[in-house]
Image (cartoon, grey):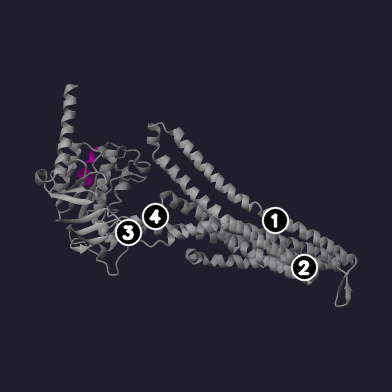
Amino acid sequence: MIKTLSRSIREYKKYAILAPIFVVFEVVFEVLIPYVMTIMLDEGIQKSNNELVVEIGCLMLGMAILSLICGILSGKFASIASAGFAKNLRHDMYEKIQTYSFANIDEFSTASLVTRMTTDVTNVQLSFQMIIRIVVRAPFMLIFAFIMAMIINWQIGLIFLVAIPFLGITLFALMSRSFKPFSKLFKQYDIINRDVEENLIGIRAVKSFVKEDDEFKKFANDSQGLKHFASKAEQILAWNMPIVQFAVYACLIAIAWFGASNIVKGYTMNGQTFFMTTGQLTSYFSYVMQILMSLMMISNIFVMITMSITSARRIVEVLKVVPDIKNPEDPVFEVASGDIDFDHVNFKYNQNAQIYNLTDCNVHIKSGQVVGIIGGTGSGKSSFVQLIPRLYDISKGSLKVGGVDVRNYDIETLRNSVAYVLQKNILFTGTIRDNLKWGNEEATEEDLVRVTKQASAYDFVMDFPGAFDYDLGQGGVNVSGGQKQRLCIARALLKNPKILILDDSTSAVDTKTDANIRQSLRETAPDVTKIIISQRVSSVEDADLILVFDDGKIVAQGTHEQLIETCPIYKEIDELQKKGSDDSKEVATND
C-alpha cells in the first residue's frame, strides 16, 4: 500500500525530504534551550554573574530564532509536498479510471469513486503532511528530550520508562478497535454521496412526482447513519486525550515529588550524595513537557493515521485494478473497412456468471450496409453492439472488424473508427461547439454545419442565441431530449467513422425527423456501416439487414419483407405497432 501511494510523490520528493530535515534541526535547537537555561540559572542568576546571563540569554534568543526559522521552512516544505502529493494522487486515480473497461467501472459506484478522489485523498494528504513533519518531530523530540533528562538525573528519568509503554499499549489498542467503525463510516459517505447525486440529477422527476419529502427522509436516514458510525468511532478515540492527560499529570506529580526531595535531601550515587539544583529541576520540567507533548502529538497522529489507513486502502483499491481491456503487444493501427464479423460469439458481463448474456451470435455485416437491430427489452441488443468498439470483451468466439480481430487493434484506433451514440445521451457543460468538437477537435465551421444538417439539428441550432456558441448548461439541460439526441448524432458523425452505431438514439424524435436522419445518413455517408437499434419497426424496415434479438440470441436476420414472412416475433412487433398507429389515427379522426 505504501509503495503504491509513494509513487504519487514524484517531483515533490525533494520537499518531502527537506521538511523532516528542517524538523530535526528545529527539535535540536528546542531541546538545547532548556539545557542552556540550566547553566544561566545555576551559574548566572544564582551567582549574580550578569555578564554570563546576558551571553547565555543572547545564545538562547539566537537558538529560538533558528528554531523558528527551521519550523517555518519545515511547515512550508511539508505543505508543498502534501499538496503536490494529493494533486498527483488525484491525477493518478483519474488517469487510472480512464483506462477502466466498463466491467471495471461496474465494480465501483460513481459516488464511491467521487468520495475516494475527494474525502479519502484529503485524509491521506493530511496524514502525509503529519508523517513528514509531526511524525518526525514527535519521536525525535521524545528521544532527544529523554536523553537530556537522563543526563540531568537518570533516576527521575526512570518515570518515563513506565509512562511511555503504558501510553503505547493503550493507543495501539484504541487504534485497532477504531478501524472497523471508520471503514463503515467511509462506506456511508459513499451512500450519502450516491443519494445526493441521484437526487440532483433526477430533480425534475422528484418534483414531478412530488417526492421531495421522501427524498428528504432518505437523506435524513443517510445522515443519521453517518452520525452513528462517526459517533461510534469518536467514542473509541475519545479515550485518547484523557489517557494522555492522565499520564502527563501523573508524570508531573511524580517528578515534582522526587525532584523536590532531591533538592532538599539529595540523592546517592556511587556512594556519594548529590543535590539537584533549582536550574536542573526547572530544565527537567521543560524536558518533561517536551516529552509529554511529544506523546500527545503521537496520540493525535494515531487518530489521524487510523482514519487515513482506511482511506488509503480505498484509494489503493482504485489504483491496483487491472483493466480487463488493454492493448496487445503488437497492435494494429489501421482499420481497413467497416466490415463486421461475429463468429459464434458468446458474452457475459460477469465471467463467474453461469448464464451468458449473448449466445452463439453469427452475422456478417458488409462495409457501408445499414443494419437494423430490433427486439424486446433485455434481449441483448445493446450488449451486442458494445462488443464492436471493444467496450467489453467477448467471452467466447471471434469478432472481427475490417477483417482483424478487435482484440488485435490498438484500442484508440478501433474506437476512433467506431462512432457510438449511446442509448443514454450525454452532453457536457459548455457550448454546442465544445460538445460537437469532442468528435474532432480540428473541426471547422463548415464541418459543424455539415454534421448538424446530417443529424437534422442545423435548423434548431441556428435558432439558439449564438448558434454553435449557445451554452447547453450542465448535462445539456437547456435543450430537449430530441435535440440532445440529434446533437449526439452530429458529434458522432464528426469523427468520420467507418462504423456508426445508433443505440435507440432517435427514440425522442418524431418519425418524420427519424426518417430524415436515416435518409441523410444513406446519402452523405454511403461507405459508413450504420447500425441502428430501435424499438420501432419503421426505423429499421428500410435497412439492408435486420437482426431480431430474443433472450440474448439472434433468432432471425434478413430484410423487412423476408422477416415478415419467416419470423413470428418480428411479424408480431410489426402488427402491434401498426395496430397502435391505426388506433391513434382513429382517435384523432373521432376527435
Measured in 3D between alpha carbons, the distance from the residue under mark 4 to the one under mark 1, in whole angstroms, is 42 Å
Amino acid carrying label 4: it is Glu
- Residue 377 occupies quadrant: top left
Residue nearer the viewer, 193 or 91:
193
Residue ID for mark 2: 157
Residue 282 lies left or right of residue 385; in this view the side is: right
- Residue 306 occupies quadrant: bottom right
Q: Earlier in the sequence, mark 4 or mark 2?
A: 4
- Does the residue at mark 4 contact the one at mark 2 (Cβ under 8 Å)? no
Q: Earlier in the sequence, mark 1 or mark 3?
A: 1
Residue 233 lies left or right of residue 509; in this view the side is: right
Could you tell me if residue 153 is visible in this image?
A: no
Instruction: Give residue 243's mark.
Output: 1
Q: What percent of the width, then of the height, locates residue 97?
A: 39, 57
Q: What percent of the width, then of the height, locates residue 268?
A: 87, 73
Circle 1 Cα neighbour tier, 10 Å, few/some/many (<14 / 14–19 / ≥20): some
Residue 9 lies left or right of residue 69; in this view the side is: left
Say above or below: 490 vs 178. above
Q: Secondary structure at mark 3?
A: loop
Amino acid carrying label 2: it is Gly
Circle 2 Cα neighbour tier, 10 Å, few/some/many (<14 / 14–19 / ≥20): many
Instruction: Give residue 107's mark.
Output: 4
Measured in 3D between alpha carbons, the distance from the residue under mark 3 to the one under mark 4, in whole angstroms, is 13 Å
Measured in 3D between alpha carbons, the distance from the residue under mark 4 to the one under mark 2, in whole angstroms, is 55 Å
Amino acid carrying label 3: it is Gln
Q: What percent of the width, then of the height, locates residue 546?
A: 15, 48
- Residue 449 occupies quadrant: top left
Residue ID for mark 3: 351
Residue nearer the viewer, 60 or 12:
12
Q: Earlier in the sequence, mark 2 or mark 3?
A: 2
- Range of the magenta residues? 449-459
Q: Earlier in the sequence, mark 4 or mark 1?
A: 4
